[in-house]
Image (tube, grey):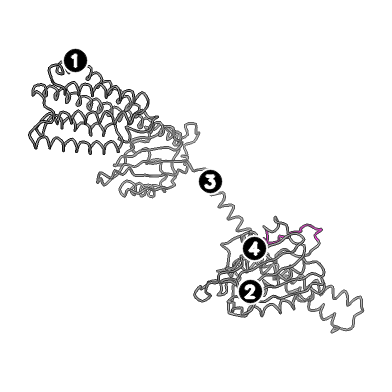
Amino acid sequence: MSLAIAGTGHRPEMLRRKTLANNSRITIVLGALAMPFAIYWLVTGSLLPFVMAAIALGSGMTTLALHQRRMFEQAAAGQVHTLLLLGLLLALADSRLADAGLAVALMAPVLASLLGRPQLRRQSWFLLAGVGALAGLSALFAAAAIPMEPATLVICSAVTFIGSIGVVIHTANRINAAYEVYDKAQVTAYRHLIEHVQDAVIRFSSDGEVLLASRSSEALFGCRRYELTGSGLGERLHVLDRPAYLTAFADANQGGKSRTIEVRMRQDDPYATSNVPHFIWVEVSLSPVVDPETTAVRHEVVALLRDVTDRKDNEAAMAEARRAAEEASEAKSRFLATIGHELRTPLNAVVGFSEMMTSGIGGELSQTHREYAGLIHQSGKHLLEVVRMLLDMSRLEAGKFELQTEPFQPQDIVEPCFDMVRDMAQKHEITLVADIGKSLPMLVADERACRQILLNLLSNAVKFSHPGGKVTVTLKRQGQSLNLSVSDHGVGMAPESLKRVGEPFFQAQDGLSRPYEGTGLGLSIVKGLVDLHEGTLRAISEIGSGTTVTVLLPINGPAIKTEETAIVTPLRKEPAAAPITPWQDEKRKAQ
């Protein structure tokens, strides 16, 4: 019924409304035809036929007027209530329990089920029960509430019953036509959709035979659709993909499960100059047509086929590019490791002998020679530091940097790192300040790696600070992590540079004329070491106001144990951190 009384724009609803109007006209015609006879009986002393004819005539006119005013639900209710009222009058005029009045009243719920909404249907059954109760009382006392001649009663009952039956039959016929129209429209719409959808649509019977193939399948396979029947479709499958296709089809056909697979299928080309078959990648979505009212072992299957050759080619190209990039990265790492080891030995000799010369072990040098030896010594140490950073970077990228975690006091690494950068800080007139929180817990981490993290952060902060500035190291507990922050009031970084913090060889001020020396590997190594500890690196900066780099390290090491660390709710919300570029290749992290 929900289909027959669909929205106002549907054909079934229009047929229902026309049926309401026709019922009103039928009632008017029946009432008008019965009126002369009713007047005759009224003159002879029988009032009931006139009342019933007047009710029919008035009801028909009223419901037709309601229909013309587009009050369709009220018109349907008027027709149902008219049948109930006529049945009630006949039941009261007949002292028998099973009479024509109850039969006429019974037509009211039938008519309501065909034309009305659920509320009218329920109401009609309640009113029918009331009519039955009044008829039962009349039969109980064996007296008619409305006296009437038996012959006249039979004629009135017969005419009313035949008229009500005619109205119900007419309504049922029209509603059935509405169903047929709706079903035909649905089938037409589905056929149009299948024929014009971009993906190819193939329908299989429960035995696996092709029942239907859409027009788009001709463009997909380069053949007529009838060529896909029988074994035509199976022969187009690549030999290596047939087992996977048959398994997926069996899951849909016998198991009632939807499956999606990608297979290679032959595509014909009538203009091809060679007999070499051309295969394309096709994504096949198999969906079973499951009927819950049947217990069939096999189901019909609907398949949607889409050409995904371009996507597969792109994936292959991306995989090849990724492989080439990985090989290039590995070659770079091997080159850095090899050249680093080759440079370290002669550089150690240069640094060692230049230090011996400046200390006077090989004899006293002139002031000029001593100055030259000092420059050699300083340059050699700088090159050794560059080599060390290159080696560390290559080990991090190759996943060969192993952590040796053990508990230690995090504040113990601050002073040794200060000592290592103190000369550099004094040269730039930078003050080093430590702000260490009270009752810091033991940190489970690689102490050597933590020293390197702090040392690189301090070196960067001192390098980019203004003369007379201050660099502050802060240590505090933050929840389940240790907060290690290094702040300066130096040159700062722009937002676009801040987004690239952690990239290897990146410097905010690059080019040959940059005023600050360095390789741009310091923060990259920090990022790698922090990632190995499963920590977090944050950076906040503003041009001219300085930079704050924060490292969060798990207190209990890379594998955090909440029951040992407990949960601490921070009372102060940390400032929003700038996004950090992910480590270049997450798959290369050391485990």
Indicate the amino acid at tag 1.
Answer: Pro
Amino acid type of the residue that numbered disc 2 sits on in the rendered structure? Lys
User: Sequence order check: which comes first, mark 2 or mark 3?
Assistant: 3
Q: Which residues are magenta?
A: 500-514
The picture places residue 476, in percent across and down from the top left corner, at 63, 74
Query: According to the image, label 2 marks what residue?
Result: 476
Numbered tag placed on residue 36 in the rendering = 1
Categorize mark 1 by other alpha carbons within 10 Å: few (<14), some (14-19), many (20+).
few
First in sequence: mark 1 or mark 4?
1
First in sequence: mark 2 vs mark 4:
2
Sequence-first tag of 3 and 1 = 1
* Disc 4 crowd, CA 10 A, few/some/many (<14, 14-19, 20+): few
Q: Nearer the viewer, residue 585 or 461?
A: 461
User: From the viewer's perspective, is the residue at label 3 or at label 1 nearer?
Assistant: 1
Quadrant occupied by the C terminus: bottom right
- Which circle marks residue 575 in the picture? 4
SS label for mark 1: helix
